[in-house]
Amino acid sequence: MATTSDTTPDDREFEPTTSVCPFCGVGCTLTYEPKTGKSTGEAGPVNTKGEICPKGAAAFEMVDNDDRLTSPLVREDGDLVPASWDEAFDRIEAEFGTVLDEHGPEALGFFSSSSCTNEENYLLQKIARVLGTNSVDNCARLCHSSTVAALSDRFGAGAMTNTLDDLTEADVFLATGANPAEQHPVIFRSYLLPAIRDGTTFIHIDPRENATTDAADIHLPVKPGHDIPLLNALAKVVIDEGLVDEEFVEERVDNFEVFEEFLADVDVAENAELAGVDPDDLREAAMAFGEADRAAAFSGMGMSQHQSGTDNVHALINLVVLTGNVGKRGTGVNPLRGQNNVQGAGDVGALPDILPGYQSVTDPEARERVADVWGVEPPVDPGLTEVEVTHGMGEDIHAAYVFAENPAVSEPNLSKVRERLDAIDFLVVQDIFLSETAEHADVVLPGSAWAEKAGTFTNTDRQVQRVRPMTDELPGEARNDLDILAEFGSRVADYEFDDDPETVFDEMTEVNPLYAGMNYADTDEGSVRWPYPEGADSGQEVLHAETFANGERTTDLHLVDHVAPADEVGEDQLVLTTGRVLQHFNSGAVTRQSGTLMKLRNENALQMHPQNAEERGIEDGDTVVVENDRGRTQVKVEVTPAIRPDTVFMTFHCADPLVNDLTGDHLDPVAGIPEYKHTSVHVSVVSNEKDV
Ligand SMILES: Nc1nc2c(c(=O)[nH]1)N[C@H]1C(S)=C(S)[C@@H](COP(=O)(O)OP(=O)(O)OC[C@H]3O[C@@H](n4cnc5c(=O)[nH]c(N)nc54)[C@H](O)[C@@H]3O)O[C@H]1N2
Ligand SMILES: Nc1nc2c(c(=O)[nH]1)N[C@H]1C(S)=C(S)[C@@H](COP(=O)(O)OP(=O)(O)OC[C@H]3O[C@@H](n4cnc5c(=O)[nH]c(N)nc54)[C@H](O)[C@@H]3O)O[C@H]1N2
Ligand code: SF4
Ligand SMILES: [Mo]
C-alpha cells in the first residue's frame, strides 16, 4: 500500500485512556498498556473485573498496523492510485452529482457500520435521508434483523428484554443458535458460567457440540433449519404437562386458546424426529424450562440467519411467553448482539424502514418530529436493505457508499455480489484496510480505527458507553471517520453536517426518543442504559414488566409452522452451516492483520462427522472440494463427532476459502436476512495433488 506521508502507524504514541473493545457486542472496557504496546482489559460497566478475551487483547494490532490505509485512493486506468483528499472528494462530488441529476436519490445506496460509533451511524443515515433516500442499512441486516423484527412485533422493542446482571438470577438458561463461549466470551465466563456452576440448568440447542455445549446439562443437536418443530414441541410439552403460567397468560396474552388448538395436532415424537433430536431429551428440556421459577432464553445466528428467521424467533417467544418468563429479573428473550455497536447502529436509525429510535419512516408524525430538528423531512418510502442494494448495483443502484463493511466477503452468493460490485457506476469505500470490497471501489477513503475516535457505542444490554481516542495522530493522511462523513455529506447535499461527536450526540438525543434525556457527559462515567425516559434518573433495566414497550398490556402467541429451508438436500449432499470461532472476527479484515490471533489459529477447517468422512474416503487433514451450483471452494477437513452426521460446518472468516461463494441469497420475507445457516453442498476429497 502506497504511503504519501512519513507518519507510519508505528511512529505514534498512544495514551492509556480507556475505551470500548472494537469486536463483539459485549462491550468490554479496554485501555492501552504502554509497557507492552498492546491493549489490556480495564474494569468497566460490563467487564467489572477488567476481564477480556483473546480478541480484546489483540485489539491494538488493527490500530498500530503497517497495512493501514494511509492515503485516499482513486481508480485511474483500472488501478487504485494514491490521491489527495481534494481529488478524492472532487471525484465523489461530481459522480454523486451526476447520479442524482440523472437518476435521483433512489439510485443511491448507503452501507452504514455496526462497528462504528452511534454518532457516525447517525450522521450517515441523516446524510442518506437529507439526500432523499431511506436506502441506508448496516450489518444488523445480516445478523439479528429477524430477531429485531419478531421482538418489535411482539413486545415493541428489538433488544435484550433483560440485562446481563439480572439474568444471573435465572434457574434455567436456554441458548439456541448461539455459541457464547466463543462469540461472547466475557458474557459466558463472567455471567453465565458462574450461575451454571451455582446450579442454573443449561440447555443448549445447536447442531454442533462446541465450547458452549461443554457447560450444558441438556444438548439438543437440532438439524440446521429445523428450530420451529423443536420449539413447537417444547411448547406442546409445556401445555400437556400443565406447566403454563396461567396467571401470566390470563393477564398478558390474548389468544391462548387459539394457540392451544394450533398445537393440538403436534406429535412431540414426530417433531423431535423432524428436528433430528432425541424425544426424551426434548421432553427433559421442556420440563426444565416449564418448571423453572425463572427461565431466560438467549438467541443467536443459528436462529436468525434463516429464511424462517423471524418465525424461528416467534416460536422462541411463544415458549417464553407461555411460561410467563418476561418482564421480570432472570427471564426474557435475549439476543446476543454481534458487533460492538450493532445495537446502536439500529437504535440511531441506520435502517431503511426505521428513523432514529425505531420510529417507522412511514409514520408522518415521526417524520415531522425529525424534520423539526433537521429542517428537512426524511423520505416517506422505506428504502432498500443492504443485500437489495448490492443486488441492484448496475441496474437501479448507480452509486453506493460503503462505510466500514466488507460485503465482498460477508454477503451470500458472492459470485453474484462481485459481478454487481463491478457493474455499479460509482463505488466509494471508507475503511481502515484495503478490504476485498475496497478492491472494487472507484474511491477509497482512509478512516480511523476505534482507538483513534471519540463518540459512543451501545452494547448488547443497551448500555451506551463512551469511546475515547488514545491518540490525535492518524496514520499518514488518514482522517477521522466522523470528519470524512461530514465532509462527504456537506459536499454532496445542500446541507452543513456537523463533525463534532458531542454536538452530533446531542442532536441524536433530540431525534431518538429512546435516548432522550441522555447527556454526553453522563456517558463519560460508566454507562447509560436505554430506554432513558426524559426526567429519569437512570435507564430501565428489565423491559415489559407492567406493559410491553409498545404500551400494550397484552401480546399474542404466534402460530408458526415449519418452513422448509430454501436449498433442497440431494441424496449425496450434506447441509453446510456456517459460523464463527473464538480467535477470528467476521470477514477477517481486522483479525487477519493480527499476528497474535493468527498464531492462535490460522486455519479454517471444514468440520465433518466420521461417518460422512468414511463414506467419502476422507481422512482428518485431507483437502476437499465443497461445491454446489453457486460455487466451489477447497478446504481442509477436521473429522469430528462433535457435528451431526448430516451436517458440515465452516467459518466465513477468510477470503480463501471463501464460504459465501456457496451460500444462497434466499431472504427471510419479513426481515430480509439471508439463509447463511443452511446450504446444500457436495463434498469430495481432492484426489490429485495438482488440484490443491
Ligand atoms: N470470536 C468471534 N466473536 C464474535 C464474532 C466473530 O466473528 N468472532 N462476530 C460477532 C457477530 S457480528 C455476531 S452476529 C455474533 C454471532 O454469535 P453467534 O450467534 O454465537 O454465532 P455463529 O457462530 O454464527 O452461530 C452460532 C451457532 O449457531 C449454530 N447453528 C447453525 N445452524 C443452526 C440452526 O439451524 N439452528 C440452531 N439452533 N443453531 C444453529 C452454529 O453451529 C453455531 O455454533 O458474534 C459476535 N462475536
Ligand atoms: N456465511 C456467513 N456469512 C456471514 C455470517 C455468517 O454467520 N455466515 N454472519 C453475518 C453477520 S452476523 C455479520 S455482522 C456480517 C459481518 O460482515 P462485515 O461487517 O462486512 O464484516 P467485518 O469483517 O466486520 O467488516 C468490517 C469492515 O470495516 C472495517 N473497519 C473496522 N473498523 C473500522 C473503523 O472503525 N472505521 C472504518 N472506516 N473501517 C473499519 C474493516 O477493515 C472491515 O473491512 O457477516 C455476515 N456474513
Ligand atoms: S468479549 Fe467481546 S467485547 Fe469483550 S474483549 Fe472479547 S471481543 Fe471484546
Ligand atoms: Mo453479526
Image: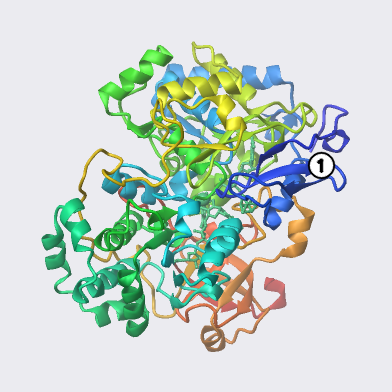
The percent position of residue 64, horizontal first and vertical second, equals 79, 41
Q: Say which residue label 1 marks.
A: 66
Between residues 267 and 665, which one lies in front from this camera angle?
Answer: 267
Looking at the image, residue 658 lies above or below residue 505: below
Looking at the image, residue 577 lies above or below residue 474: below
In the rendered view, how is the structure colored? rainbow
- Tell me the quadrant of the picture where the N terminus can be found: top right
The percent position of residue 316, horizontal first and vertical second, equals 32, 61
Residue 678 visible in rendering: no
Where on the picture, by quarter, is residue 580?
bottom right
Label 1: which secondary element = loop
Between residues 122 and 332, which one lies in front from this camera angle?
Answer: 332
Between residues 649 and 461, which one lies in front from this camera angle?
Answer: 461
- Identify which amino acid the numbered label 1 is placed on: Asp
Residue 536 visible in rendering: yes
- Tell me the quadrant of the picture where the C terminus can be found: bottom right
The percent position of residue 337, horizontal first and vertical second, equals 49, 50
Residue at 20 percent across and 51 percent down: it is: 252
Looking at the image, residue 639 lies above or below residue 118: below
Viewed as shown, does residue 371 lie left or right of 587?
A: left
Number of labels in the image equals 1
Looking at the image, residue 107 lies above or below residue 163: above
Residue at 72 percent across and 63 percent down: it is: 602
